[in-house]
Image (tube, rainbow, N blue to C red):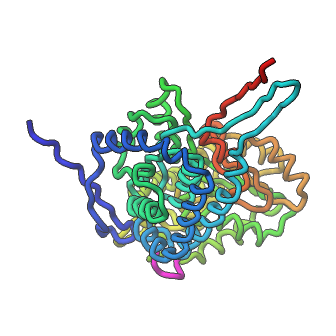
C-alpha cells in the first residue's frame, strides 16, 4: 500500500504574493495522536494548584513583552496588517492577559451557597477537559487568547488550530507557552486548513470554540451537533452605526472612518453600514470622505501605512462584487471602488452614499475597506434599518444625549452597544453575538466560567 503523502501548506505574504514558508499540514492521524496525548495529560495539568498555572501564564505574558517586536513583524508579514496595528495588537493583548491572570482564581473558587442545620450546598468549577480552539487570522492574539488563556488557567488541555493564514503566529504562541512552562501535551497547535479543522472536530473533545465566518460556523455546529459537548461560535457581523443630528460632525466622521477601516476593515466588529440623519448627511459625507482619502495605503511594514493588504485573496472578489452591485443599483461612489494594481492583494478604501438594503453592500458582511452610508429621516427609520439584518454583533449611536442613544440601542438586538465609539472590545465586558453572529460568550467573568462545568454538592452531616 502506498504511503499517503503529506499535504503542504504554503504561507504567502499578502502584501507582495511572495512565499514566506512551506510546511506539512497535520494529517488526521497526527491530530488523533495529539488528541490522545492531550487527553491523557489533562488530569495532571488540572491537578496543579491554580496559582502554579497562573505563574506559568504570567511568564507567557513576560515573554510576549520581551519578544513583542518580532511577533509583530511576523504578524504583519503573514496577514498584511500594518506594522503599527500589529504592535497595537501585541500591546492590547497584555490587558487581556492581566484580566485573566487577576480574576480567574476568584471566579473559579469553590462557592458555599447555603449552610444551615447540618446541610451545606456548594459549587465547584471543574475544567471541561480537552478543548478544541479553532481560531481566526485577523486578530490571532486577541481572538486566540480569549480562549486558550482562560482554558489553560481553568485546567483544560487545548488543541489550538490557528487559521492557515496565521500559522506562523500560531506557532509563535505555542513556542512562548512552552517556554513559559506549559507542557507540550497540554497545548498543541494544529497546522492546516479546512481538512485539519474537520479532523480536529472528529476527536474526543469536550468543547469546541470557533471564531470565523457564519458559513463555517454552521458547518462546525453541524459537525458536532449529535455530541453532548460545549460549543461556542464567535461569528461575523454587519455592524451598524447611526449618526444623530446633534453630533460634532467632524468627530463622528473621524471616529466612524477609523471604525470602518482599521485593520483594513477586516474585523468582525468593524462598522459595516452607517446611517446619517438627513440634517447633517451632506457635511458628514464630506468629512468622512476627506478622512478616508487621507489614509495611506501600501507596504504593511511601512510605519506610515494605515490600510494594508487583504489577507485572503478570495475576499477581493467579494469586495469587487459588492462595489459593482452598488454602482449598478445607483449608489454614488465617493472614493475607491476597485482592486489596486501591482503585486499583493490590495483594495482601495471605498465609500458609497445613496445606498439601500437591496444592495449586497448593506446586507452581507464585507470584511474589507468598503462602506455604505445611507441617509435617514430620523431615529425611527435609523432603528428599523439597523434591525434589518440576520446578524447581531455590535451596534452604535453617535449623539450628544446618552439617554437618547440608550433608548435607540435598547431596541437593536446586538451583543455590544456603543455610544459615541465603535469597534471596541474590553476584557471586562462579555463579547457575544446574537442571531447569525454566533452563540456563547468570551471575555469578562462569563468568559472564564465558559471553560468549566459546575458541580453541585449537597452535603448533609450525619444525624
Q: Main secondary structure of the magenta part?
A: loop
Residue farthest to the front, as pictured: 463
**Which quadrant of the rendered structure holds the C terminus?**
top right
**Which quadrant of the rendered structure holds the N terminus?**
top left
Relative side of 288 to 326, left or right: right
* Residue nearest the viewer, comparing 17 with 281: 17
Residue 154 spot, x, y in % from top left: 59, 47
**One can see residue 115 in this view:** yes
Residue farthest to the left, as pictured: 1
* Residue nearest the viewer, comparing 302 with 285: 302
Residue 443 spot, x, y in % from top left: 66, 51
- Residue at 47% over, 43% down: 42
| Residue 162 vertical placement versus 32 (above, below) | below
Residue farthest to the top, as pictured: 463
| Residue 293 vertical placement versus 157 (above, below) | below
Give the residues drawn in magenta, as a range: 300-307
- Residue at 59% over, 42% down: 451
| Residue 208 vertical placement versus 337 (above, below) | above
**One can see residue 390 in this view:** no
Amino acid at each position: 500500500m502506498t504511503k499517503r503523502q503529506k499535504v503542504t501548506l504554503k504561507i504567502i505574504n499578502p502584501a507582495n504574493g511572495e512565499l514566506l514558508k512551506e510546511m506539512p499540514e497535520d494529517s488526521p492521524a497526527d491530530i488523533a495522536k495529539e488528541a490522545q496525548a492531550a487527553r491523557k495529560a489533562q488530569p495532571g495539568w488540572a491537578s496543579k494548584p491554580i496559582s502554579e498555572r497562573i505563574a506559568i501564564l504570567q511568564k507567557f505574558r513576560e515573554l510576549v513583552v520581551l519578544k513583542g517586536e518580532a511577533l509583530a513583524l511576523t504578524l504583519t508579514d503573514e496577514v498584511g496588517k500594518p506594522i503599527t496595528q500589529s504592535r497595537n495588537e501585541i500591546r492590547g493583548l497584555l490587558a487581556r492577559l492581566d484580566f485573566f491572570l487577576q480574576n480567574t482564581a476568584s471566579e473559579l473558587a469553590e462557592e458555599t451557597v447555603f449552610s444551615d442545620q447540618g446541610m451545606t450546598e456548594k459549587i465547584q468549577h471543574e475544567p471541561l477537559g480537552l478543548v478544541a480552539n479553532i481560531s481566526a487570522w485577523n486578530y490571532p492574539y486577541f481572538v486566540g487568547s480569549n480562549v486558550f488563556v482562560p482554558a489553560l488557567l481553568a485546567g483544560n488541555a487545548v488543541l489550538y488550530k490557528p487559521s492557515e493564514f496565521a500559522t506562523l503566529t500560531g506557532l509563535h504562541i505555542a513556542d512562548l507557552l512552552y517556554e513559559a512552562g506549559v507542557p507540550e501535551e497540554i497545548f498543541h497547535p494544529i497546522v492546516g486548513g479546512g481538512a485539519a479543522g474537520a479532523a480536529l472536530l472528529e476527536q474526543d473533545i469536550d468543547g469546541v470554540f470557533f471564531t470565523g465566518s457564519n458559513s463555517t460556523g454552521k458547518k462546525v455546529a453541524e459537525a458536532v451537533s449529535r455530541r453532548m459537548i460545549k460549543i461556542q461560535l464567535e461569528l461575523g457581523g454587519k455592524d451598524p452605526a447611526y449618526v444623530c443630528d446633534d453630533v460634532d460632525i467632524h468627530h463622528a466622521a473621524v471616529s466612524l472612518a477609523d471604525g470602518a477601516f482599521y485593520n483594513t476593515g477586516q474585523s468582525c466588529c468593524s462598522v459595516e453600514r452607517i446611517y446619517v440623519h438627513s440634517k447633517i448627511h451632506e457635511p458628514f459625507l464630506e468629512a468622512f470622505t476627506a478622512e478616508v482619502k487621507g489614509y495611506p495605503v501600501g507596504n504593511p511594514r511601512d510605519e506610515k501605512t494605515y490600510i494594508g493588504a487583504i489577507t485572503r485573496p478570495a475576499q477581493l472578489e467579494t469586495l469587487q462584487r459588492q462595489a459593482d452591485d452598488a454602482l449598478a443599483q445607483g449608489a454614488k461612489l465617493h472614493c475607491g471602488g476597485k482592486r489596486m494594481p501591482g503585486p499583493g492583494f490590495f483594495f482601495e478604501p471605498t465609500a458609497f452614499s445613496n445606498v439601500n438594503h437591496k444592495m449586497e453592500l448593506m446586507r452581507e458582511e464585507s470584511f474589507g475597506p468598503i462602506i455604505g452610508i445611507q441617509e435617514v429621516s430620523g431615529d425611527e427609520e435609523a432603528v428599523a434599518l439597523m434591525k434589518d439584518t440576520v446578524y447581531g454583533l455590535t451596534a452604535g449611536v453617535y449623539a450628544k444625549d446618552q439617554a437618547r442613544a440608550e433608548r435607540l440601542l435598547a431596541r437593536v438586538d446586538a451583543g455590544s452597544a456603543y455610544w459615541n465609539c465603535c469597534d471596541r472590545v474590553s476584557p471586562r465586558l462579555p463579547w457575544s453575538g446574537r442571531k447569525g453572529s454566533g452563540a456563547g460568550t468570551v471575555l469578562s467573568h462569563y468568559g472564564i466560567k465558559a471553560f468549566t462545568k459546575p458541580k453541585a454538592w449537597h452535603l448533609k452531616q450525619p444525624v
